Image: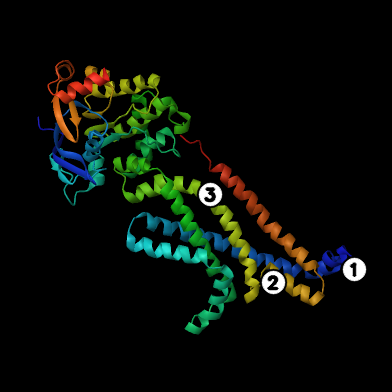
Amino acid sequence: MPPILELIGLRKRFGALDALADVSLSVAPGELVFVLGPSGSGKSTMLRCCNLLERPDEGAVVLEGRDIAARGVDLDAARKRIGMVFQAFNLYPHLSALANVTLALRKALRLPRAEAEARGMAALDRVGLADKARNMPGQLSGGQQQRVAIARAMALEPAVMLFDEPTSALDPELVDEVLAVMRELRAAGMTMLVVSHEMRFARAAADRVVFMDRGAVVEQGPPERIFEAPRSERLRAFLSRRA
Amino acid sequence: MGFADAFLDMAVIARYAPSILSGMGVTLALAVLIVLAGTAAGLALACLRATGSRRLSIPIVIFADVFRALPPLALILLAYFGLPNVGVSLSSFMVLFTVLALVLAAFAEEIFWAGIAATPKGQWEAARSTGLGFRSTLLWVVLPQAARMAVAPLTNRAIAITKMTALGTVIGVPDILNQATTAVSFSGDASPLTLAALAYVAIFLPLVIASRRLERRFQWRRL
């Protein structure tokens, strides 16, 4: 099957820093690709290049067969096909949970209100928060906020979802509820690219683990292989520090 | 002559109450028009500045800085006595309205801009990542948050600037203060000024109270 998302030769410099030095990666339909690496390894930059929140200096971002990093591409249209979940949730604080989910449905997909709300409620139901639809973000726990953020991204029915350290800002006891939602998404066949430090989740749910360091993909493979038999010295060192 | 004679002569107050009342109408009309036009213009300018275009933002910043720096009285005199020389003849009412609306617009632009700039980058990113364009993001995500931050400083500034309608007295706008000083010259008694003070309180105290309620309403629980 052709990949849903393919990164080809991405390069990105921030001043003197090579954030991405020739990164290529492809994600197949229904695949959960888990990206790990030390901080500053470029994994978040790579993820943010996937929906052009960060524009790569060089390289292609091929979404469903089309390079969306090329000039003249309608980015707003492309981004409707790519959901993103952020470390800091980034819920709109002035809108209820439901309105957070329906805003893009109404203003980007231009669905009528009733249809947007039905779809929004269905998305909130899938993350187990239908009863919090009218709550404001400030009235929700961190875990609940992140689940609303997942519902917001999911409601657009994207081709692929990006997760940028989705549990890093959460208290430990709230991590599992978010991971459980991500597992369900995976079971439902969602294609996911996840940057995270949750190794247990990677072992249990990832199809493939990608290890990045210094702006490059160092090693990738199935989780058992990556965690049990790391080939590169850098990955071994990284795993031993984490163990 | 006692205090009551000087400031609270009932006969004088009764005689000049109608003209003070008509002055209240003028002051109130000016205040409402200045707040509406100044706030709307300031908001529009802040939105243009948010596009990030230097060609737009440089003139906006210059306008905002000049109109915040100059004393409104100087601007009023300049416009009233200067503009006719270049063929623009505005009534004293229009001069006062235009100058104060522009001054409020300059402050409002800075206040809204501060709110837009203070809205976290993550809000833009979250909205843009769902396919919302720049304008939709500004309108539905950023401005509602910026406006909440702007309410308190903006109402303060709006009250301060609408009170400056009293400056219109120097170019003959028949506002409260003008009516009162005219009455003082005719009656030789300060009581009309007492009435003027009461008239200002009657207009601006409700405004101050309303702004407090507005500020409370626009609070929402932060993350």
Name the kind of residue labelled 3 in the image. Val
Q: Which residue is mark 3?
A: B151
Same chain? Circles 3 and 1: yes
In depth, the one of B202 and A177 nearer the eye is A177
- What residue is shown at x 73% (from left), y 64% (from top)? B196
Name which of mark 1 and mark 2 comes first in the sequence. 1
The quadrant in which the C terminus of chain B is found is: top left
Q: Which residue is mark 1?
A: B1
- Numbered label attached to residue B178: 2
Label 1 Cα crowd, 10 Å radius (few <14 / some 14-19 / many 20+): few
Helix, strand or loop at mark 2? helix
Query: Can the viewer see residue A192?
Result: yes
- What residue is shown at x 48% (from left), y 59% (from top)? B40
Q: In the image, is residue B71 above or below residue B86? A: above
Q: Does residue A206 appear to the left or right of B87 in the view shown?
A: left
Query: Can the viewer see residue A109?
Result: no
Counting from the top left corner in percent of width and height, residue B99 is at: 53, 69
- What residue is shown at x 29% (from left), y 43% (from top)? B131
Chain letter of mark 1 equals: B
Counting from the top left corner in percent of width and height, residue B20 is at: 73, 67
In depth, the one of A235 and A92 nearer the eye is A235
Counting from the top left corner in percent of width and height, residue A52 is at: 23, 43
Name the kind of residue labelled 1 in the image. Met
State how far apart marks 3 and 1 are (Cα).
Answer: 47 Å
